[in-house]
Amino acid sequence: MYKILTILLITTLCTACAQNTPKSVTEDMKLAEHFYNRAIYSEAERVLLSLKAAMPDNYDIYFRLGNIYVRTGQFPAAEAMYQKCIDLNPEEPKGWYNLSLLRVKQAIAVSEQGHRKTALTDGNYSHQFVMLREGLITAITGKE
């Protein structure tokens, strides 16, 4: 029993020490990517949040969290992550671009909601909402 406890304690200590090494950071980033690519967003988020606590100025962590939050419909959280990217590195275009795409998605959602709420009361705006939505979708997809 004593040997098992000793082994567990040593393993735990080694694991804790290894969590701050560059190798473990790389492994954790790969693990987060693994979860993300398989649409296991809650696990990818969990790994990235632990990395964020250890590396609060890492652009890629915020960028990946933003992508997770967009995919899970958490637009305010995504916006905060992309804004943090911009704050950390305003010269990097990825944060700006994804924030722009997010705001277009938000505009599409608002136009759809407006259309649903007013379609029966105002035919003019109903058509304008449809045209706005189609224009926004065309803008981000390039397809008509």
Image (cartoon, grey):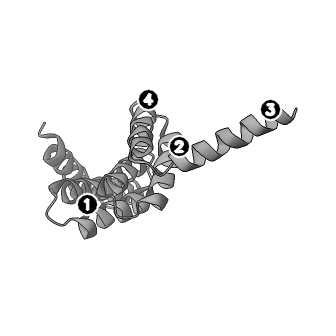
Q: What residue is disc 2 on?
A: 42
Disc nearer the start of the sequence (1/3)? 3
- The residue labelled by disc 1 is 125
Q: What element does badge 3 sit on? A: helix
Please tell me whether residue 137 is drawn above or below residue 96 in the rendered image: above
- Regarding residue 121, the answer to whether it shows in the image is no
Crowd band around label 2 with a 10 angstrom C-alpha radius: few (<14), some (14–19), many (20+): some
Tag 3: residue type?
Ile
Mark whose residue sits in front, 1 or 4: 4
> Taking the image as drawn, is residue 85 in sight?
yes
Identified at 51% across, 45% down, the residue is 18
- Residue type, numbered disc 1: Tyr
Horizontal side of residue 61 vs 18, given as left or right: left
For marks 1 and 3, give the CA distance: 72 Å
What's the distance in space between the residues labelled 2 and 4, CA to CA?
Answer: 11 Å
Q: Which residue is mark 3?
A: 4
Rendered image: mark on residue 38:
4
